[in-house]
Image (cartoon, helix red, strand yellow):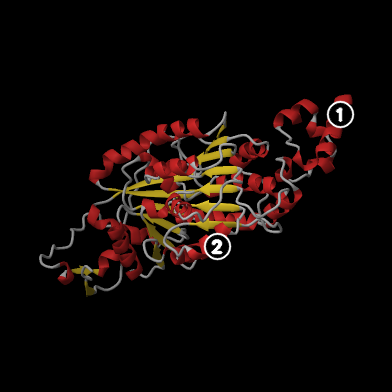
């Protein structure tokens, strides 16, 4: 009883900063403490202040995800952290919430946190999350990325916005123009570090880090940990806490994987058949090239589906997909990095990824936040080797599935020689309905 009394006194004195771990519960008999204390918010038990707890609960989140439970407490006490977790595991809130907690007690007006992300979609997503979690505070954030004008970004940076979320290339542009002042920087976050490596941003990241104050907290989050990222962490971090909430190179266990053997020329017809299923509520389709994305989106749209593609008007396409206006979104790997859309029911690999980690990144778009999802992969005879590599990475085989009433022996359409602008393609390859013929648009 004396130990329990001391424990209760400690929790009252430290207030919302206390971190009640499983060890504390077992050691001090937390399970037998008064019921009123057990009803504390799971987020306040991590050490977050009441203002942030109200913001989190106002967004509808009831319990922290595994990466949030493990990462937030050490970040709150100022430790450098390396977090390995799959896409969709809640990494954004895992670093945004403790950053906000840190800045709440400080006077605004200087840039004190920098988040580097590989794509503008991800940067915009983090900015939206930051705005929602910072509701009711004076903390401001701004996303800085290419493809848009620099004037609004320059104004925000020069005004000393509290949190800057940026892609490396555009941030370097602003740094060269002296638009940003990092002398007051306290926290650096490298988000999706493995994808920044894949996209060739590592030299830019190293240049940016070299221009930042050495006395700072550094947080690194990644779905995988390639040797290059491991080496980078050793040069920019101080005795980091390592957190891994899922096996590397493995997608969430709540995903059902299926492979559909199909000839190359029948992929679109099979795709349209599958999209007609009632459970295909929100579908992300991955293809290998931009040109193929355009063609597949056009053919699926001709079959009567609401479809968008990320290559053109990407923000509009993402907004339509998030709102449910578009049932289907067609994208390449590079364009889709940073997509954060809740409720994606299916990921369809129209083309098999050549690298198993790309498969993990793709299918991780479904089954987010511990939900269930389905990953479907179209496999031609030439793809079997790549699929076996994916199966080895998963540690299990992917069942082959066929549709009983689909004609897998249908011949390919006849080849038409001549200028591409005079070629014609038959719409019935993209779905049912009467036979219609239309000219195929020429190159521009």
Q: Please state which of the two labelled residues, at mark 2 or mark 1, is closer to the viewer.
A: 2
Q: Is residue 383 above or below residue 419?
A: above
Q: Secondary structure at mark 2?
A: helix
Query: Residue 6 got which mark?
Result: 1
Say whether marks 2 and 1 touch (CB < 8 Å).
no
Measuring from the top left, give residue 399's x and y in whole percent: 37, 42
Q: CA distance from mark 2 to mark 1?
A: 52 Å
Crowding at dot 1, Cα within 10 Å, few <14 / some 14-19 / many 20+, comes out as few
Q: Can residue 371 be seen here?
A: no
* Residue 240 shown left or right of residue 101 in the figure: left
Q: Is residue 93 above or below residue 227?
A: below
| Residue 40, quarter of picture | top right
Locate the N terminus and report the quarter of the image it occupies: top right
Measuring from the top left, give residue 290's x and y in whole percent: 31, 58
Q: Secondary structure at mark 1?
A: helix
Q: Can residue 430 be seen here?
A: yes
- The tally of labels here is 2
Q: Which residue is mark 2?
A: 155
Q: Residue at x 41, y 54 (%)?
A: 336
In the image shown, does 227 or 396 lie closer to the viewer? 227
Q: Is residue 184 above or below residue 396?
A: below
Q: Tell which residue pokes out farthest to the left in this image.
A: 417
Measuring from the top left, give residue 408's x and y in whole percent: 25, 54
* Residue 388 shown left or right of residue 396 in the figure: left
């Amino acid at each position: 009883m004396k130990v329990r009394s001391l424990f209760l006194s400690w929790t009252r004195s430290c207030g919302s900063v206390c971190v009640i771990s499983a060890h504390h519960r077992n050691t001090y008999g937390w399970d037998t403490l008064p019921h009123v204390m057990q009803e504390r918010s799971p987020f306040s038990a991590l050490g977050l202040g009441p203002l942030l707890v109200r913001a989190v609960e106002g967004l509808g989140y009831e319990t922290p995800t595994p990466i949030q439970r493990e990462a937030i407490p050490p970040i709150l006490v100022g430790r450098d952290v390396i977090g390995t977790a799959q896409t969709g595991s809640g990494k954004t809130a895992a670093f945004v919430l403790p950053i906000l907690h840190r800045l709440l007690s400080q006077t605004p007006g200087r840039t004190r946190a920098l988040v580097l992300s590989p794509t503008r979609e991800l940067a915009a997503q983090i900015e939206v999350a930051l705005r929602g979690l910072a509701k009711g505070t004076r903390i401001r954030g701004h996303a800085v990325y290419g493809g848009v004008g620099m004037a609004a970004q320059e104004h925000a940076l020069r005004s000393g916005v509290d949190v800057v979320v940026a892609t490396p290339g555009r941030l370097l542009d602003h740094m060269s123009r002296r638009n940003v002042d990092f002398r007051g920087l306290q926290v650096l976050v490298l988000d999706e570090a493995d994808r920044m490596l894949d996209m060739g941003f590592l030299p830019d990241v190293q240049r940016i880090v070299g221009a930042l104050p050495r006395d700072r907290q550094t947080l690194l989050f990644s779905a995988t940990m390639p040797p290059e990222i491991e080496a980078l962490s050793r040069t920019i971090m101080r005795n980091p806490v390592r957190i891994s909430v899922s096996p590397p190179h493995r997608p969430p266990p709540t995903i059902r994987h299926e492979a559909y053997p199909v000839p190359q020329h029948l992929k679109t017809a099979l795709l349209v058949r599958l999209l007609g299923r009632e459970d295909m509520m929100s579908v992300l389709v991955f293809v290998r090239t931009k040109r193929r994305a355009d063609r597949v989106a056009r053919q699926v749209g001709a079959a009567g589906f609401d479809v968008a593609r990320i290559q053109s008007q990407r923000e509009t396409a993402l907004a339509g997909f998030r709102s449910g206006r578009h049932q289907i979104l067609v994208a390449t790997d590079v364009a889709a990095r940073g997509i954060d859309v809740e409720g994606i029911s299916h990921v369809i690999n129209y083309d098999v990824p050549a690298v198993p980690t790309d498969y993990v990144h793709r299918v991780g778009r479904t089954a987010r936040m511990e939900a269930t999802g389905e990953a479907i992969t179209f496999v031609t005879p030439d793809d079997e080797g790549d699929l076996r590599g994916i199966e080895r990475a998963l540690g299990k085989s992917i069942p082959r599935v066929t549709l009983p009433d689909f004609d897998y022996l249908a011949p390919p359409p006849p080849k038409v020689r001549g200028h591409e602008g005079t070629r014609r393609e038959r719409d019935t390859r993209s779905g049912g309905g009467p036979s219609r013929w239309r000219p195929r648009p020429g190159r521009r």
